[in-house]
Structures are given as C-alpha cells and as structure tokens.
Amino acid sequence: MSNYPVKLGKRALRKVEQDSVEVIGPAARANPFVSFRYSYTEISALGGKAHVKSRKARFEDGKLTSEAFEGDLDQGAYEQMVGQAQQYVLGQTALLLNAFASLLPFSQKQRRDRS
C-alpha cells in the first residue's frame, strides 16, 4: 500500500444507536426473465436388445445444465414399457371420449331406456 500517492488519515469510530441500524435480509428469489427445459428420450428395439438415448437441457437462474445418457435394455423391459405406454394412451383417450359421450345422440337413447 505504500506505493499509493495519497495516504488516508486515521479516523475515530462513530457510535451508532441500536434502533437506527436496519438489518436487510437476503433478496427474495425473483422470477427469471428467461428459463426453459428440454428433454428428449428415444427407445428403439433392434435384435434382442432395446437401445435407450436420453438428453436433457435446462436454463434456470442463469445456469445452463445439460445431461445425456445412452444404454441397452433387455427386450422384455422394452416390451413392458411399450405395453405401459399403450395402456396409458388408451386410458387417456377413453377419458377424453367419455367427456364427449353425453353430446352424442345414442347416449340420449340409452338414458331413456334406463329410466
């Protein structure tokens, strides 16, 4: 510090009243202006094995994170996943169609027959 041309003189400490000090807490986490998430999973069967590729990327709180995974599965596990996916899609389709079933003309006829 001796290389600086101006030297600061010694100052006495000030006494501060306890009530006049304002304690400021950490800033609340603000919503980021830009954030996104992206994920991609591909499962393919070739021969007796299933190949899985998965990629994920996200940008949150000013930080970019990326992950990638590749691996092989047994054919049985692949068939089980495909079966579960088909059951899920069929279940969701049934729920959607049931919502519109009351609008169809044959549903009114069935209601009269039950009464």
Image (tube, helix red, strand yellow):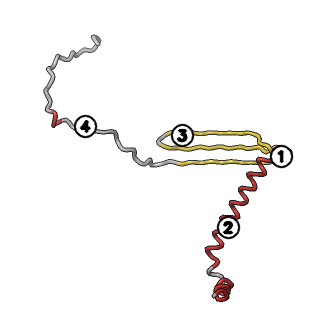
Element assignment for label 2: helix
Residue under label 2, please give it. 93
Q: Residues within 10 Å of mark 1 (few under 14, many from 20)?
A: few
Element assignment for label 4: loop
Element assignment for label 3: strand
Residue 36: x and y in percent read: 54, 48
Q: Earlier in the sequence, mark 4 or mark 1?
A: 4
- Vertical position of residue 38 compared to residue 8: above or below: below
Q: Earlier in the sequence, mark 1 or mark 3?
A: 1
Q: Which mark is residue 64?
A: 3
Q: Please tell me whether mark 2 or mark 1 is closer to you in this view.
A: 2
Residue under label 1, please give it. 46
Q: Disc 1 vs disc 3: Cβ atoms closer than 8 Å?
A: no
Residue under label 4, please give it. 23
Q: Disc 3 vs disc 2: Cβ atoms closer than 8 Å?
A: no
Q: Please tell me whether mark 4 or mark 3 is closer to you in this view.
A: 4
Q: Residues within 10 Å of mark 2 (few under 14, many from 20)?
A: few
Quarter of the picture containing the N terminus is: top left
Quarter of the picture containing the C terminus is: bottom right
Residue 103, image quadrant: bottom right
Q: Of the residues shown, which amino acid type is indicated by label 2? A: Thr
Q: CA distance from mark 2 to mark 1?
A: 29 Å
